[in-house]
Image (tube, grey):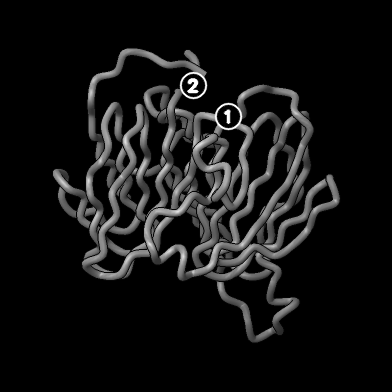
């Protein structure tokens, strides 16, 4: 982790500027360098290294693969995702269920759109989810897994801590991540409803669904993101029903 002298900046990144991986069964849009998409000028913001906006067809998904020394948060927007890992955890992730996986010393897991096997063959819809990665405070921790449901009424009431390692969220966070400088907040907004962004050295605002107006910066559509440095406190107001994901970060990746 690192802190530094910062210059205030608001950097709007439009949806169409993202890297795209289209494998037929998977439509994945990457806000940062990922896989074979590499841009040395776009590797992270603050502590956030990955913000992947994924749509996976029914009956397909990610086969068992490894991760190490990463805090991985998954947030489903539509459909459901079946998770299995080498620590013995398995379950179905659906909208409103926050999931955190601490890769630590090493973990194997798979993610499949196989929930139709449970719900019946008529349920073969794609699953749409956002997966986000931040570095842990320290490497070599014991791998772990956590998931908890956040009800719609709470998400509709304003920005809600979804995943956090910050002390200020200790009594209200749905899931804990192993980074005391980072927190993920989420909100579901109706037209005209506003929330105020926190102030932090680094913020990342992502609009996975709907459209909003960001005070001082204008309209943001589905897939748009904003990277804030040394600023915050702006209002975000929904134009149409929208969902937003906000990372509040008080450190950055060490150079």
Q: Residues within 10 Å of mark 2 (few under 14, many from 20)?
A: some
Left or right of 255 on screen, residue 191:
left
Q: Considering only vertical position in the picture, is 85 above or below 10?
A: below
Residue at figure coordinates x 32%, y 64% from the top left: 210
Q: Is residue 228 left or right of residue 153?
A: left
**Where 220 falls versus 189 (above or below)?**
above
Q: Secondary structure at mark 1?
A: loop
- Tell me the crowding category of disc 1: few under 14, some 14 to 19, or many 20 or more residues within 10 angstroms, Cα based: many
Q: Is residue 186 left or right of residue 80?
A: left
Note whether residue 201 is visible. Answer: yes
Q: Position of residue 81 (x, y in %)?
A: 64, 63
* Front residue of this view, candidates 87 and 174: 174
Q: Position of residue 244 (x, y in %)?
A: 38, 55
- Name the residue rendered at 23%, 25% in the picture: 8
Query: In the rendered view, does 203 fall on the left or right side of 73?
Result: left
Quadrant hosting residue 102? top right
Name the residue tied to disc 2.
253
Q: Residue at x 25, y 53 (%)?
A: 236
SS type, badge 2: loop
The mark tally for this picture is 2
Label ID, residue 135: 1
Q: Earlier in the sequence, mark 2 or mark 1?
A: 1
In terms of depth relative to the viewer, which is nearer, 240 or 56?
240
**Looking at the picture, how far across and down is residue 189, in whole percent?**
33, 65
Q: Tell me, for residue 154, which label it has, or none.
A: none
Q: Are marks 2 and 1 in contact (CB under 8 Å)?
A: yes
Q: Is residue 209 visible?
A: no
The answer to which of 105 and 22 lies nearer the viewer is 105
C-alpha distance separating marks 2 and 1: 8 Å
């Amino acid at each position: 982790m690192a802190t530094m002298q910062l210059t205030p900046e608001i950097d709007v990144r439009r949806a169409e500027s993202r890297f795209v991986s289209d494998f037929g069964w998977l439509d994945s849009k990457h806000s940062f360098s990922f896989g074979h998409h590499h841009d040395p000028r776009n590797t992270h913001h603050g502590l956030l290294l990955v913000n992947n906006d994924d749509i996976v067809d029914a009956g397909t998904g990610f086969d068992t693969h490894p991760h190490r020394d990463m805090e991985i948060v998954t947030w489903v927007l539509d459909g459901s995702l079946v998770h299995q890992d080498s620590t013995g955890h398995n379950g179905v992730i659906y909208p409103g269920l926050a999931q955190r996986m601490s890769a630590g010393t090493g973990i194997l897991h798979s993610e499949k759109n196989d929930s139709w096997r449970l719900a019946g063959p008529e349920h073969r819809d794609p699953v749409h989810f956002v997966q986000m990665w931040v570095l842990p405070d320290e490497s070599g921790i014991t791998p772990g897994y956590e998931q908890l449901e956040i009800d719609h009424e709470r998400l509709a009431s304003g920005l809600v801590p979804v995943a956090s390692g910050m002390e200020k969220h200790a009594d209200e966070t749905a899931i804990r991540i192993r980074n005391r400088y980072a927190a993920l907040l989420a909100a579901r907004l109706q037209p005209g409803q506003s929330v105020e962004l926190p102030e932090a050295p680094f913020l990342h605002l992502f609009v996975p669904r709907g459209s909003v107006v960001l005070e001082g910066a204008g309209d943001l559509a589905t897939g748009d993101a904003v990277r804030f440095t040394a600023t915050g406190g702006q209002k975000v107001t929904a134009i149409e029903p929208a969902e937003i994901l906000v990372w509040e970060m008080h450190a950055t990746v060490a150079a």
